[in-house]
Amino acid sequence: MLFEESRKWLTELKLPKSDVFDLPDSGKRFEDGAHFRTETSTVNSMDALEGLLNRAESLGIVINRVGETYGIFRHRDEELHDMLSLCREKGVELNLSVGPRATNDLSATAQSKQGMTIGYRLRGMEQLVRAVEDVRRAVSLGCRGITLYDEGLLWVLAELKTKEYLPPALQLKISAHTGQANPASCLLLERLGANSINPVRDLDVFMLAALRQALSVPLDIHVDNPQGSGGFVRTYEAPEIVRICAPVNLKSGNIMVPSHGFRSGRTDGENMAEQMAVVLEHIDRYFPAAVQSPPGSGPALPKI
């Protein structure tokens, strides 16, 4: 193998020496012994949440975790309370996403072709302050799972948890919008306090296997995506992703919506549940030994 000296240095840093081409089984699991949990994101209204969970119930499938991606600051307290209450009732984790972000403020750079790489990160100290305020508001309503897009905010929130200004059990999920795509970057996020990490959406299975070798926290992996972020559907890879990436939050349903950040509705939720059911059928057919967590088992259940 080429570049042996560099590879040796990297292994001394507890990183894989390459992408992992033999795709070994992951020996890691969630605390309850499960290989995987299901997650549907872009659930951005109470209507969408009701549509998703009601349709999932009629299909006989379990949605373990839901992701809101519209932004905490774009919802009324009443709607957030209702969403948190329903998830608590159904035993579903709910991650609310930090609202102020570069794409919402006056940044012309964030809207430009070259500047899009800054993604949803925060601009300036005041936006960081407002992001903390957004998290405080969500926590006060009972939220215990936050999706965030900025490495600095991750460090800040982890420190505030240590000081118990925020609940120590608050779960900090890193979004794919941060653009992390290799084991070193993801390991850094884990060390900064990330409780689960969503790498970029189009990593192949060999790259994902290398991430699992480097990380201890759960991975959040997309099985499909809206056209706005590529529009791919990798349903036949879902069983393999569960096998090599456990513990993994398997994300499905977004191929049924046009983009990640729009105000989804009831029909969108129903359609996303249908897509998740297809993925679960494939896992049951090709990896029947895989264990999914039951409802009510995740650490980001709302505290209502």
Image: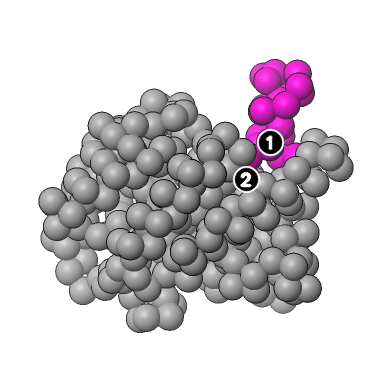
Question: x, y (%) of residue 303?
Answer: 49, 66
Label of residue 296 in the image: none
**Which residue has dot 1 on it?**
101
Q: Is residue 91 left or right of residue 142?
A: left
Is 109 included in the stretch rendered in magenta?
A: yes
**How many marks overall?**
2
Q: Please, what secondary structure does the residue beneath circle 2 have?
A: loop
The structure residue drawn at horizontal position 37% and vertical position 73%, both measured from the top left corner, is: 297
Question: x, y (%) of residue 232?
Answer: 36, 35
Question: x, y (%) of residue 144?
Answer: 54, 63
| Contact between labelled residues 2 and 1, with CB atoms less than 8 Å apart | yes
Q: Residue furthest right?
A: 125
**Which residue has dot 2 on it?**
98
Q: Please, what secondary structure does the residue beneath circle 1 have?
A: loop
Q: Is residue 28 visible?
A: yes
The amino acid type found where label 2 is placed reads: Val
* Residues drawn in magenta: 98-122
**Distance of mark 1 from mark 2, alpha carbons?**
8 Å
The structure residue drawn at horizontal position 42% and vertical position 76%, both measured from the top left corner, is: 30
Is 148 included in the stretch rendered in magenta?
A: no
Displayed quadrant of residue 250: bottom left
Q: Residue furthest front?
A: 78
Does residue 86 lie above or below 26 as drawn? above
Question: x, y (%) of residue 275?
Answer: 24, 42
In the image, 234 versus 127, the foreground residue is 127
The structure residue drawn at horizontal position 73% and vertical position 73%, both measured from the top left corner, is: 164
In the image, 9 versus 103, the foreground residue is 103
Does residue 132 lie above or below 162 as drawn? above
Q: Residues within 10 Å of mark 1 (few under 14, many from 20)?
A: many
The amino acid type found where label 1 is placed reads: Arg
Does residue 167 lie above or below 226 as drawn? below
